Image (cartoon, rainbow, N blue to C red):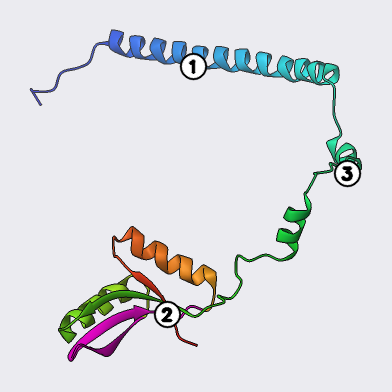
Amino acid sequence: MAGEKSSSPWVWVFLFLMLGFFAAFIIFLDQKLVGTSVSKPVEKQNQDRTKPTIDFYSVLPDRKVEIPVSEEEKQAIENPTINKTAGDQVLLQVGSFQNPEDAERLKAELAFLGLEAKVKAAEVNDDTWHRVQIGPFASNTALSRAQNLLLENKIKYVQRKLPQ
């Protein structure tokens, strides 16, 4: 027990003084905040009374805006052609190969893009060519989507009409 040191009473006095000053400071801040928070809502209420109010829920339904539309635009609105079925049956030929494995490889690449392709064999000048074709398309929208996908992926194509 020879190694124990007794602490000085001044350390304890200093510690209690610091604790007392801290508590007084917290109480002071609390009173300061309570005093300022009580006065602000009264000022806000006075400011809100001076601002004009607009009741747009009752004003806007009474207003109507006339937009001039030409006869050509009216016909276009009445007969939209965005999703109109394609008049001609259209195919997109993406490639033509003598080797059937090359055609199947391109068909697989197109499947990864979400396009369903078919490989058809054709006889040209006594040689067999394997054509990779997409379609026919049910609507102009589906045709445009396929064309955009091919262009975005830098794949060249030829648009062909099916014989009727």
Q: Quadrant of residue 16?
A: top left
- The picture places residue 39, in percent across and down from the top left corner, at 73, 14
Q: Nearer the viewer, residue 76 or 8?
A: 76
* Residue depicted at 33% across the width and 69% down the height: 157
Q: Quadrant of residue 17?
A: top left
Q: Is residue 43 above or below residue 68?
A: above
- The picture places residue 72, in percent across and down from the top left corner, at 74, 55
Asked which secondary structure carries label 2, the reply is loop
What's drawn in magenta, residue-wise? 117-137
Crowdedness near tag 1: few (<14), some (14–19) or many (≥20) residues, C-alpha within 10 Å:
few
Residue at which label 3 appears: 61
* Residue depicted at 61% across the width and 16% down the height: 33
Residue 120 within the magenta-colored segment of the rendering: yes
Residue at which label 2 appears: 135
Which residue type carries mark 2? Gly
Q: Nearer the viewer, mark 1 or mark 3?
A: 3
Crowdedness near tag 2: few (<14), some (14–19) or many (≥20) residues, C-alpha within 10 Å:
some
Residue at which label 1 appears: 23
* Residue depicted at 60% across the width and 65% down the height: 82
Q: Is residue 38 left or right of residue 10?
A: right
Q: Is residue 26 above or below residue 162?
A: above
